[in-house]
Image: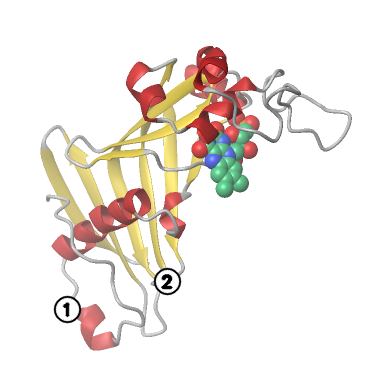
């Protein structure tokens, strides 16, 4: 089963159209959702939810911005602060899940796999625009209690985008999260009846099947 890109479904899908859906089309939606999230800054697919396992084994979720997609390798990339709890969580257990939901066509996609964290990643840092880089200048680690509604940024960069040289000082706090997925669970929600499929990749072979939604 290949993730050959198709377009996102036009909502609402009528029963007749839903009954004609193929597993190849469902796999195509995976590719289409990821491409839309990466290429279209206004897309709701730009901001998926990354789930990790918290220190005590409880689920831990947060919104992240989709920064890169390699469909062939089934890899996604996110930026984060190397000092944030999610990085420690992934260090303890790399299993992760990423959830995308598109309200335009009521399509949900849950990707399951593993995430690797690379601190200071050169290529990812080079691809980060100055406003993104500034976030890594926050003085205390994300999640540190604060006295009020603070940005956490040093005074000289608070409210402005500083020159590249100053931004460079945040690089040791910058981490690239590379999420590799082996499974996609995709649900199309419709008044005419929901549809659900699972696509699994083991080694090079892909296997797709319909599931009861
Ligand atoms: C719209 C939006 C986009 C966000 N994008 C990111 C992101 O790309 N990377 C990131 O680490 N945190 C991002 N955050 C903040 C996280 O959701 C989260 O609050 C923060 O990373 C701390 O997570 P942790 O305590 O689970 O490590 C974003 C939050 C929002 C609301």
Going 15% across and 49% down the picture, which residue do you hit?
A: 207
- Where residue 71 appears, x then y in whole percent? 21, 42
Q: Tell me the quarter of the picture where residue 57 sits.
A: top right
Characterize the local packing of mark 1: few (<14), some (14-19) or many (20 or more) Cα atoms within 10 angstroms: few
Horizontal side, residue 132 vs residue 100: left or right: right
Viewer can see residue 93: no
* Looking at the image, residue 95 lies above or below residue 82: below
Q: Tell me the quarter of the picture where residue 128 sits.
A: top left
Horizontal side, residue 94 vs residue 74: left or right: right
Q: What mark, if any, has residue 96 been given in the picture? A: none
Viewer can see residue 20: yes
Identify the residue under disc 1. 20
- Where residue 88 appears, x then y in whole percent? 56, 19
Identify the residue under disc 2. 104
- Disc 2, disc 1: CB below 8 Å? no
Going 39% across and 78% down the picture, which residue do you hit?
A: 190
Pick out the residue farthest to the right: 147
Q: Is mark 1 within 8 Å of ligand 1?
A: no
Horizontal side, residue 211 vs residue 86: left or right: left
Horizontal side, residue 31 vs residue 186: left or right: left
- Where residue 177 appears, x then y in whole percent? 42, 27
- Where residue 159 appears, x then y in whole percent? 70, 35
Question: Which residue is more in the foreground, 4 or 201?
Answer: 4
Q: Quadrant of ligand 1?
A: top right
> Which of pointers 2 and 1 lies earlier in the amino acid sequence?
1
* Looking at the image, residue 185 lies above or below residue 82: below
Mark 1, secondary structure of its residue? loop
Q: Tell me the quarter of the picture where residue 16 sits.
A: bottom left
Question: Which residue is more in the foreground, 62 or 119?
Answer: 119
Characterize the local packing of mark 2: few (<14), some (14-19) or many (20 or more) Cα atoms within 10 angstroms: few
* Looking at the image, residue 127 lies above or below residue 97: above
Q: CA distance from mark 2 to mark 1?
A: 21 Å
């Amino acid at each position: 089963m290949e993730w050959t890109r198709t377009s996102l479904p036009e909502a609402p899908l009528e029963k007749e159209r839903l009954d004609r859906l193929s597993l190849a089309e469902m796999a195509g939606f995976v590719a289409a959702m990821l491409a839309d999230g990466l290429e279209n800054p206004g897309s709701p697919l730009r901001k998926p939810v990354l789930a990790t396992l918290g220190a005590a084994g409880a689920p831990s979720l947060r919104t992240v911005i989709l920064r890169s997609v390699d469909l062939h390798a089934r890899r996604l990339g996110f930026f984060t602060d190397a000092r944030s709890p999610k990085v420690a969580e992934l260090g303890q257990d790399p299993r992760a899940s990423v959830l995308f939901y598109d309200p335009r066509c009521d399509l949900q996609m849950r990707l399951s796999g593993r995430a690797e964290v690379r601190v200071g990643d050169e290529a990812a840092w080079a691809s980060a625009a100055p406003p993104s880089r500034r976030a890594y200048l926050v003085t205390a680690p994300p999640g540190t209690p604060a006295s009020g509604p603070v940005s956490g940024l040093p005074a000289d960069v608070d409210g402005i985008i500083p020159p590249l040289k100053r931004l460079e000082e945040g690089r040791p706090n910058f981490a690239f999260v590379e999420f590799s997925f082996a499974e996609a669970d995709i649900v199309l929600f419709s008044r005419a009846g929901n549809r659900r499929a699972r696509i699994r990749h083991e080694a090079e072979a892909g296997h797709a099947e319909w599931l009861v939604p």
